[in-house]
Amino acid sequence: MNDIFDDRLKAKGFVKIISLRQIKTADIVYLVKESGFDGFYIDAEHGVFSVREISDISMSAKSNGLISWVRVPEASVSLVGPILDAGAGGIIFPHVSNAQEALKAVQMCKYPPLGKRSMAALSAASLYQKAPAQKLKQERDSGVFVIAMIENSEGIDNAREIASVPGVNALMMGPMDLSFELGVPGQTTHPLVIDATLKAAKAAQSAGIHFVVGEAGHELVDQLRGLGARIFTGGSDGSYLLGALTKAAAEFDAKLKG
């Protein structure tokens, strides 16, 4: 598994990451590191990032010992391959509904015989270090974290099968899309969404893989930790920036009006 992830997990027993949507330069790596977070995932599903930007951020994260994953907008070879070659330490696949889709995701991230990933020997994936192809294969196969994101009813029904696919490292929820799917749009803490989250967490625990706790699941932290969850995500760079700016503006107003 990913050495950076393993090191962070062993140090504290859990890891905490944020999502990136707005900041598109490597500066964010140093801000995240200084803040005390363990890393981030680049949200290329809802944010606009070029492969060049993903590479710059991912390589900087590797050099600074931070977790750096990418949530892709879709599971396509033409998208996932270049992002992995650009240095991403893991891929979050959205809208995974069944074991077949989970297997397809794994195959995009792993080299033969487990997968179908194409080999680029000299690339950002290995920080441009020269090494025999077999050594690169072993390092990259073990170093890529594969996360299956469950966002619909079919995915919940098939959570155990998805979690059991060899090569899947974690399950993650998409509570907003799931809330729409379940007929309670925007209610990410609705009992139906909570029940689905717990079902997926139990499926991950049963399969011996990780479960990623999103911000909407924080009220379930104790239960999810009891089910083995060790990966926790906070808000996005934009939400934290807006929150800090809003607070600063309010404090400024209070001083000027005083």
Image (cartoon, rainbow, N blue to C red):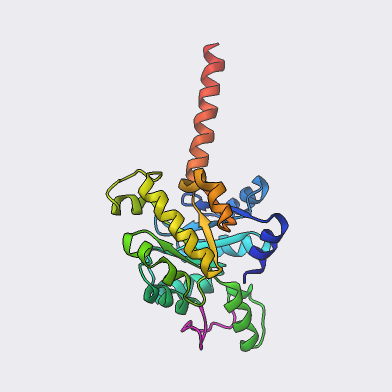
Closest to the observer, 233 or 209: 209
* Residue 164, x across and y down, in percent: 48, 73
* Residue 95, x across and y down, in percent: 36, 63
Task: Give residue 11's quadrant in the image.
Answer: bottom right
* Residue 178, x across and y down, in percent: 35, 54
Q: Is residue 116 one of those drawn in magenta? A: yes
Q: Quadrant of the C terminus?
A: top right
Q: Residue furthest top?
A: 258
Q: Residue furthest right?
A: 11
Q: Is residue 95 visible?
A: no
* Residue 12, x across and y down, in percent: 70, 54
Q: Considering only vertical position in the picture, is 135 above or below 208?
A: below
Magenta highlight range = 110-122
Question: Could you tell me which residue is drawn at 57 percent across and 78 percent down?
Answer: 141
Q: Is residue 145 one of those drawn in magenta? A: no
Q: Is residue 90 visible?
A: yes
Task: Give residue 61's quadrant in the image.
Answer: bottom right
Q: Please state if 158 lies on the left or on the right of 33 as rendered.
A: left
Q: Please state if 10 lies on the left or on the right of 76 as rendered.
A: right
